[in-house]
Image: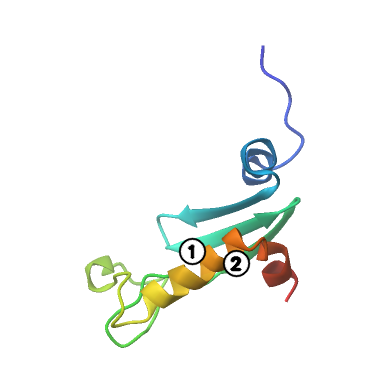
Amino acid sequence: MHQKINEGLMCWHSKIFNGGCGLFLKTSSGTIFMVNDGNIGIYDSPYRNKYGEMIDKFGKDYDKYNIDQQGGGLESLKQLRNFYINNKIGNLIVQ
């Protein structure tokens, strides 16, 4: 038997499996969704080109974008990890 879910799946998953906090990557755009106690925020993609520019949502040339030190994407991902580990996702959402 399936229970009816009255909330979005990201919020439900975060509440059931992660104590209300979660980070999700939308693979088609590289966008990060942050969830904290039912609130959702959007964070910039960690995928960057060698100049530090983020993925153009209208462009489809994804091969030029990576998560590495050169474009700053690795640092962006490390910041997200620290926000998550230190339970600061809620603070980041309300900013």
> Which residue, as the protein is rendered here, is positioned at the far bottom?
51
Report, in whole angstroms, how far the alpha carbon at label 1 lies from the one at label 2: 16 Å
Q: Which residue is mark 1?
A: 31
Residue drawn 60% across the image and 66% down it: 83
Which secondary structure lies at badge 2? helix
Vertical position of residue 77 compared to residue 18: above or below: below
Residue drawn 42% across the image and 76% down it: 75
Q: Quadrant of residue 36?
A: bottom right
Q: Amino acid at mark 2?
A: Phe
Residue drawn 31% across the image and 88% down it: 51
Q: Is residue 64 left or right of residue 38?
A: left
> Which residue, as the protein is rendered here, is positioned at the far top?
1
Q: Give the image location of residue 30, x and y in percent.
A: 42, 63
Which secondary structure lies at badge 1? strand
Work out which quarter of the rendered image holds the C terminus and state it.
bottom right
Vertical position of residue 11 compared to residue 43: above or below: above
Query: Quick check: can you spot residue 45?
Result: no
Q: Is residue 70 left or right of residue 84?
A: left
Q: Give the image location of residue 19, x and y in percent.
A: 69, 44
Q: Give the image location of residue 81, x and y in percent.
A: 51, 63
What label does residue 18 carry, if any?
A: none
Q: Which residue is mark 2?
A: 83
Dots 1, 2 in contact, CB < 8 A: no
Query: Quick check: can you spot residue 62?
Result: yes
Along the polypeptide, which appears first: circle 1 or circle 2?
A: 1
Q: Give the image location of residue 29, x and y in percent.
A: 42, 62
Other residues around mark 2 within 10 Å, as few (<14) / some (14–19) / many (≥20): some
Q: Nearer the viewer, mark 1 or mark 2?
A: 2
Question: Total number of numbered labels?
Answer: 2
